[in-house]
Image (cartoon, grey):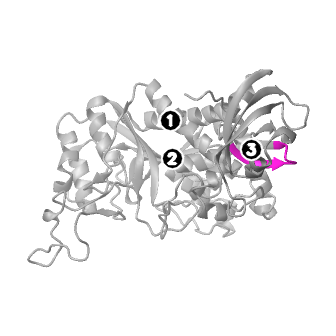
Amino acid sequence: MSQRTKIKALLEGGKTDIDVTVKGWVRTFRNNQFIALNDGSTNSNLQIVVDFENTDPTLLKRITTGAAISATGKLVASLGKGQSVEVKATEIEILGDSDPEKYPLQPKKHSLEFLREIAHLRFRTNTFGAVFRVRNTLSYAIHQFFQERGFIYLHTPIITASDAEGAGETFHVTNFDIANPPKTETGEIDYKQDFFGRSTNLTVSGQLEGELGAMALSDIYTFGPTFRAENSNTTRHLAEFWMIEPEMAFYDLKDNADLAEALLKYVISYALDKNKEDIEFLSQRLQEEEKQKPQNERSEMTLLEKLQFCLNNDFERLTYTEAIDILKESTPNKKKKFQYLVEGWGTDLQSEHERYLVEKHFKKPVILTDYPKEIKSFYMRQNDDGKTVAAMDILFPGIGEIVGGSQREERLDKLEQRMDEIGIPKEELWWYLDTRRFGGCQHAGFGLGFERLVLFVTGMGNIRDVIPFPRFPKNAEF
């Protein structure tokens, strides 16, 4: 290991008059004397003071924005404004040059659109440094939450023959020469000759396989990439994203909702504790951004207030039917302010409706349950009324739905009947139905889109800015 100390450790360590070596990238170099050095461990730079009178001028010329350097010297209390400590350098080594004429990240404000085009370098900015440190913390907290509760981390397949959602918007996986695939006698593509001997795709969800694990291990969770071939160019959709999907045997809908609420509060609290500086920076950034918007589009809460809002309130629980009644009678619906008017029972709720319930009506996060079966997936447990299923969505301020889940249908006859109604071939999912044939039991689970969570905790406005290398229509760069 190199005798190098991270900048975060030096800034938080409270020590001075010690010899240190730091390595990082130059943010700025002023007056041939003051280097602002950053190594990604924190948004704060460490000032390196160069004895320029006794330093080779050719070396000084190579200390440019973006250059990687090593600096050795004494850590001392700083007399200048803006930092508590600085390093009086006795030795500077250039580890990697950066041509200032060509380096695209100059010390000025860059638009997020521009930074998306240079996603391979955007980690070096304060905004993305903060975002990806928070993403890292949330990822760690999710594992810690489930591990503390005795859950088994299950890796479900990325290549699968099933489409769990029944949405049909999948990326196909094949080993064929796509210009000339083998055909059957009837002229269809002969997938029996393909690598897996059948048609396969990238997974849209690990849920169905997760249920198989829960039927033996009791409590499992998946945390992995999922893929949707939706031709969607919105700020909320990606073609490749990460999902957290726990499945729990012997859970009912209430147990499921309790676990999801506990998870969200745990990870938000953990991030606020571990990444306080980053979240404060992102909150400040968001406030500056909000000032550019018209008054009626500005958020009523700062980022920190929004996060505390979710921690300090018990989530309001109500049925879909109760929510429809509230929305139908709401002022924006009566005055036709909603883009999608709520006509009555059976309406598929939009983000604007979800946000109204959270931000205006209840002023707390909301858990909606018992949706019409027609707008939900085949595997959800049918309620006794014959019209609704034991589903739940958790709605958050500014974002709408953040979690979707349900109690799963454990009764074989009811599940098969529903599959027949929707037209899902039972022979394709024989293995899934086996868990109902052999020792089936009440069970439940939910899905939490990881990028949605990171979007919420960082206050960023576009989902492409919370995943390192976003994948969306016409874009697979880097």
- Span colored in magenta: 25-34
- Residue at the image point whose x is 78% and y is 26% from the top: 74
Q: Is residue 278 above or below residue 463?
A: above
Q: Which part of the image, by quadrant, shows the N terminus?
A: top right
Q: Amino acid at mark 2?
A: Phe
Is 28 colored magenta in this rendering? yes
- In the rendered structure, the answer to whether residue 79 lies left or right of residue 254 reads right
Q: Residue 123's mark?
A: none
Q: Residue 281's mark?
A: 3
Local SS, label 3: helix
Residue 152 % position (x, y): 36, 30
Residue 123 % position (x, y): 62, 50
Q: Indicate which disc, 1 or 2, sits on the residue closer to the N terminus.
A: 1
Check whether the beta carbons of the residues at disc 1 and disc 3 lie within 8 A of each other.
no
Is 77 colored magenta in this rendering? no
- Residue at the image point whose x is 53% and y is 68% from the top: 233
Residue 476 visible? The answer is: yes
Residue 204 % position (x, y): 37, 55
Residue assigned mark 2: 450
Q: Amino acid at mark 1?
A: Ile
- In the rendered structure, the answer to whether residue 437 lies left or right of residue 248 reads left
Check whether the beta carbons of the residues at disc 1 and disc 2 lie within 8 A of each other.
yes
Local SS, label 2: helix
Is residue 408 or residue 191 the one in the foreground?
A: 191
Residue assigned mark 1: 142
Residue 305 visible? The answer is: no
Q: Residue furthest left?
A: 185
